[in-house]
Image (cartoon, helix red, strand yellow):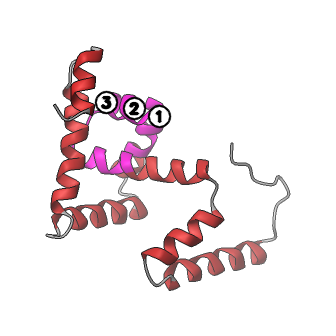
Amino acid sequence: MTQISKKLLNSDAFHELFESFDWLIINLKNRDEVFECFKDLLTKHERVIIAKRIAILFLLSKGFTIEAISFHLKVSCATVIRLKRLMDDDTVGYNIIIKKLNAMQTSKRTNEKLKSIVSFFDALITAKTNMHSRAKLMHGA
């Protein structure tokens, strides 16, 4: 589990840390730089947490149910509900993420890839719950 020190920073140091972090993010030039930096900065667990949060936001924006998202992404309903509430509260950062994902979805270059992701999640959610149906889904039959 990710932990943070209980020793508090003074507000100037805290502000400086976040300014440096923001500057780094803004100045990454391409996908490779982003990948390498976050691969080294974040643990695998932290990257999974972030990826799941992004997936939750995307799936909520596409109308998937809380229960379906929870089941298929292996997160608690409480996590999905918390993100849904933040989305519903018009949280700026989450809305930017959703807008970017939707823009990516509509771009010609990535449209088919995202359609297949949505179709996969849709099929996963609507598939029968027996092992035979899941096996057929996973093997593309």
Secondary structure category for the residue under label 1: loop
Please tell me how crowded label 1 is: few (under 14), some (14-19), or many (20+) other residues with Cα within 10 Å: some
* CB within 8 Å, label 1 to label 2: yes
Q: Which amino acid, mark 2? A: Ser
Q: Work out whether 133 lies above or below 70.
A: above
- Residue identified by numbered label 1: 75
Tell me if residue 80 is in the magenta stretch: yes
Query: Residue at position x 63%, y 60% from top?
Result: 42
Return the disc, 1 or 2, that comes first in the chain's sequence: 2
In front: 118, or 140? 140
- Residue identified by numbered label 2: 70
Return the disc, 1 or 3, that comes first in the chain's sequence: 3
Tell me if residue 90 is in the magenta stretch: no
Q: Work out whether 35 lies above or below 12.
A: above
Per the rendered image, the range of residues in magenta is 55-84
Q: Work out whether 22 lies above or below 133.
A: below
Please tell me how crowded label 3 is: few (under 14), some (14-19), or many (20+) other residues with Cα within 10 Å: some
- Spot occupied by residue 121 in the image (x, y as percentages of width and height): 25, 39
